[in-house]
Image (spheres, rainbow, N blue to C red):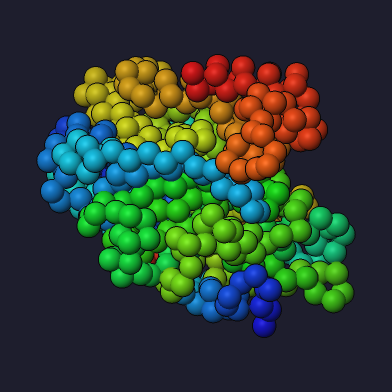
């Protein structure tokens, strides 16, 4: 039986895998980039906005060629109840220029483009091929992957697992903890078609500019959040739902999403669009708490497979974490090969040094309490209602009654909410400690 | 055909918007018999593709063809051995749109 042999095999041609393959190829290493879909990105779904600054270092000059939908110039955080909507709505025209902050994208297009760039650097892309397991040497070091192709064994000095949130390879390598529902949220999303001018009219945008709405509340009592993003000719609307909460609820995801779309704060933006795609994907939510062992002998893990995704309220980032960790894994693997040391120690030292020098571990560490805080019962239910009720009373003109001050309204509403002051103060302290 | 009072469209029509290249080999196998003792039925609620359908005799009917490959079912399943889960063979399964 014949086996193809490479310096490195990267499993998964998402942003982590393509960044890893690109770095390896650029270092002069032979690298095979495996993708189980018929094209890169076929299996990938996100909200989604990409914060692409990290691409400046990986692919200088990417801006003219990446298939982006719109440049985000408007970011709103909305707090919803069934009848109220309180927003912090920020716009910056500088984000529409060269120094842009976030871009909306559709992953099948974006991931295909990025994998193409890895191929242009010399990586060999193999699509429609599922990695079915690890190949190991007699002493247990990883030495390749088995695939579902006939004669499909691929041998390599280093295997980089970028096989996504359900990483079977990280689990097989015993580097991942058994999956636990509280570490994940389920994203469900609809893509709705509109004329570009209609999108620009609804969201008050100039041509080419985009909006990013992140929403707290409106998830039908299931912990999570919602989102609305503008693409060129479509709007993405969806929910991120706590898997633990969803399983004990009696509401199905598409019903919760239908409710969200019908909410008076959301409906004016999304009503009337033709559904052109419905999809779902798991999100690794727990960061450091779910992070697997990042290296083994001949083995590295990056991207969602390594729990490297940031889900922290106003910051929802994944593709940039995947790009950065994938590039670090590729660079570490190339350096370890050059030094002739692809043992666990040799790979891990180089990989963690590169990760420590970047934002991935620093952000995940600093915001490690954020998911728990944001998905907590008070943050999900009582606080959105409290904030909306205070706003409503401040903004309701009660003539002939004289106006009440903010403090007396807040005190009255806090009392009516049933929240204990002690809990509210403690949550405020953790909020400041986490985000401050 | 089930139409939720809140959804404007039938669930079948919703699922028909997404492309699935169906493989001849199921990538998820559900042991319907081991589901008879299950009281939570979390998969029935949580699967975003609605692939788990309770049967009149207390079992579960499952069809893999329109699976998003998300992994929610095995995360929520409490019955050991009820769901065996892998990825579909290369090139098949869900294909999200490029345009």
Say whether residue A248 is left or right of residue A281.
right
- Estimate the x, y position of residue A405 in percent, counting from the top left: 63, 27
Along the line of sight, the residue nearer the viewer: A436 or A5 = A436
Q: Quadrant of residue B36?
A: bottom right
Say whether residue A18 is left or right of residue A44.
left
Along the line of sight, the residue nearer the viewer: B43 or A336 = B43
Image quarter where the N terminus of chain A lies is: bottom left
Residue at left offset 33%, top offset 55%: A204
Along the line of sight, the residue nearer the viewer: A80 or A219 = A80
Along the line of sight, the residue nearer the viewer: A331 or A361 = A361
Residue at left offset 24%, top offset 40%: A93
Q: Quadrant of residue A373?
A: top right
Q: Looking at the image, can residue A48 be seen?
A: yes
Q: Residue furthest bottom?
A: B1
- Estimate the x, y position of residue A209 in percent, counting from the top left: 26, 51
Q: Quadrant of residue A136?
A: top left
Say whether residue A160 is left or right of residue A164.
left
Residue at left offset 61%, top offset 17%: A429
């Amino acid at each position: 039986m014949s086996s193809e042999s490479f310096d490195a095999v990267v499993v998964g041609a998402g942003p982590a895998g393509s960044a890893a393959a690109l770095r390896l190829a650029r270092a002069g290493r032979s690298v095979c980039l495996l993708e189980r879909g018929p094209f890169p990105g076929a299996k990938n779904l996100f909200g989604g906005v990409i914060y692409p600054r990290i691409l400046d270092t990986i692919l200088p000059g990417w801006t003219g060629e990446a298939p982006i939908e719109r440049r985000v110039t408007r970011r709103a955080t909305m707090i919803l109840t069934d009848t109220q909507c309180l927003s912090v709505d920020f716009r910056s025209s500088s984000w529409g220029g060269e120094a842009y902050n976030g871009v909306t994208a559709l992953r099948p297009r974006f991931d295909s483009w990025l994998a193409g760039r890895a191929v242009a650097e010399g990586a060999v892309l193999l699509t429609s091929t599922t990695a079915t397991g690890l190949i190991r040497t007699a002493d247990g070091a990883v030495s390749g992957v088995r695939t579902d192709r006939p004669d499909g064994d691929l041998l390599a000095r280093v295997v980089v697992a970028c096989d996504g949130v359900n990483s079977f390879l990280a689990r097989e390598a015993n580097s991942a903890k058994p999956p636990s529902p509280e570490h994940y949220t389920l994203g469900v999303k609809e893509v709705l078609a509109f004329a570009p001018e209609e999108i620009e009219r609804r969201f008050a945008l100039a041509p080419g500019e985009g909006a990013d709405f992140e929403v707290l509340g409106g998830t039908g009592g299931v912990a999570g959040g919602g989102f609305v993003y503008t693409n060129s000719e479509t709007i993405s609307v969806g929910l991120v739902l706590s898997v633990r909460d969803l399983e004990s609820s009696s509401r199905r995801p598409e019903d919760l999403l239908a409710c969200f779309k019908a909410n008076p704060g959301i409906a004016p933006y999304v009503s009337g669009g033709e559904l052109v795609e419905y999809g779902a994907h798991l999100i690794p939510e727990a960061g450091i708490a779910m992070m697997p062992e990042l290296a083994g002998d001949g083995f590295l893990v990056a991207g969602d497979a390594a729990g490297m995704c940031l889900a922290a309220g106003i910051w929802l980032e994944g593709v940039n974490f995947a790009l950065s960790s994938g590039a670090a894994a590729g660079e570490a693997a190339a350096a370890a090969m050059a030094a002739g040391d692809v043992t666990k120690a040799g790979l891990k030292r180089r990989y963690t040094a590169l990760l420590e020098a970047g934002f991935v571990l620093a952000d995940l560490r600093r915001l490690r309490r954020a998911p728990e805080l944001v998905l907590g019962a008070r943050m999900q239910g009582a606080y959105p209602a409290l904030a909306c009720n205070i706003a409503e009373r401040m903004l309701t003109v009660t003539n002939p009654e004289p106006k009440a001050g903010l403090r007396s309204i807040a005190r009255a509403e806090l009392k009516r909410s049933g929240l204990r002051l002690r809990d509210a103060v403690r949550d405020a302290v953790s909020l400041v400690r986490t985000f401050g | 055909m089930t139409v939720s009072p809140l959804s404007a469209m039938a669930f079948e029509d919703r699922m028909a918007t997404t492309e699935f290249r169906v493989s001849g080999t199921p990538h998820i196998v559900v042991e319907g018999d081991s589901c008879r003792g299950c009281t939570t039925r979390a998969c029935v609620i949580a699967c975003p593709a609605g692939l788990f359908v309770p049967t009149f005799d207390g079992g579960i009917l499952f069809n893999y063809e329109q699976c998003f490959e998300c992994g929610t079912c095995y995360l929520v399943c409490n019955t050991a051995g009820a769901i065996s889960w892998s990825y579909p063979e290369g090139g098949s399964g869900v294909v999200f749109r490029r345009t």
